[in-house]
Image (spheres, rainbow, N blue to C red):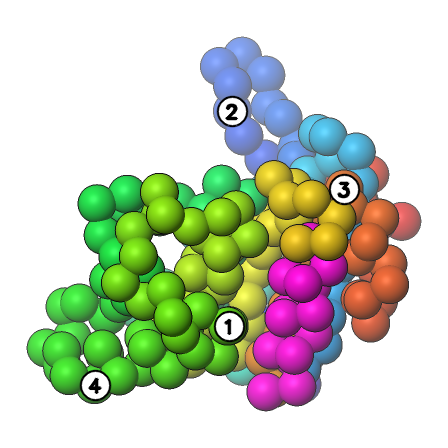
């Protein structure tokens, strides 16, 4: 069974007088260790699909399962707990806290676990893994765009997720830096982590194991 599976997923939004169907019966399987690219024009439902796969949203109809667990049957608290442990997120705009160091930004998702020493060690190890071992005490203002994205990637891996969901991760980067980030994603998949990227970047075609095209809420 796939690690993350969506079956006949429909997502509708009531805009007040009109029902918008953002997803129209989507089926998708995602396995650990694969690099999946999701492409499509603006308004095609890519971000909605990413939110559903990331357990940030639940389908109007249809099912999403993670390692056999029906996410829709979970309470909000249970879904939040599962999302925290199972899924990492990387975004185009990095979303780093400007007043914190690189290490502190990476530590953020685990600050409430009560294991500061273990968390710090893990954060430093991840920053070293992404090539920022000499930048652990630098604040975001002291980092380049590519370095900020590497910090964001390290942060997304702090809880050892099985799936990494990325939304236009190279959108704010030049091509050379974008390739470095995609090389890093490819390396992450060798550690049995699935990487799913929503993108407009044609570079992804060189890296992804497969590409899914979404148009008007449907997989083509």
Check disc 4 and report its element: helix, strand or loop. helix
Rendered view: 66 above or below 199: below
**4 vs 1, front mark:** 1
Asked if the stretch drawn in magenta spans residue 168, the answer is no
Residue that sits furthest to the top in the current view: 17
Question: Mark 3 or 2 closer to N-term?
Answer: 2
Instruction: Identify the residue position indicated by label 1 in the image.
Output: 130
Tally of numbered tags: 4
Task: Name the residue at 28% across, 46% down.
Answer: 97
Task: Name the residue at 43% across, 78% down.
Answer: 128
Front residue of this view, candidates 192 and 144: 144
Instruction: Identify the residue position indicated by label 3 in the image.
Output: 200
Instruction: Identify the residue position indicated by label 2 in the image.
Output: 14
Task: Name the residue at 23% across, 79% down.
Answer: 119
Residue 168, horizontal then vertical, whole percent: 64, 46
Rendered view: 75 above or below 176: below
Residue 34, horizontal then vertical, whole percent: 72, 77
Check disc 2 and report its element: helix, strand or loop. strand
Over which residues does the magenta segment extend? 178-191
* Viewport quadrant of the N terminus: bottom right
């Amino acid at each position: 069974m796939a690690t993350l599976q969506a079956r006949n997923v429909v997502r509708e939004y009531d805009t007040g007088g009109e029902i918008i169907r953002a997803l129209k019966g989507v089926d998708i399987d995602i396995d650990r260790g694969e690099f999946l690219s999701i492409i499509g024009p603006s308004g095609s439902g890519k971000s909605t699909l990413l939110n559903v796969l990331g357990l940030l949203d639940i389908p109007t109809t249809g099912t999403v399962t993670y390692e056999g667990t029906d996410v829709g049957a979970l309470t909000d608290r249970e879904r939040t707990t599962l999302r925290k442990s199972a899924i990492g997120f990387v975004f185009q705009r990095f979303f780093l806290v400007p007043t914190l160091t690189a290490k502190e930004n990476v530590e953020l998702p685990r600050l409430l676990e009560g294991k500061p020493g273990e968390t710090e060690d893990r954060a430093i190890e991840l920053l070293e893994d992404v090539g920022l071992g000499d930048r652990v005490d630098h604040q975001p203002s002291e980092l380049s765009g590519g370095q900020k994205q590497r910090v964001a990637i390290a942060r997304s891996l702090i809880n050892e997720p099985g799936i990494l969901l990325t939304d236009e991760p190279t959108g704010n980067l030049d091509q050379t830096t974008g390739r470095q980030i995609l090389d890093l994603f490819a390396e992450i998949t060798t550690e049995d982590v699935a990487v799913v990227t929503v993108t407009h970047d044609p570079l992804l075609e060189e890296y992804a194991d497969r590409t899914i095209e979404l148009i008007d809420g449907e997989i083509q």
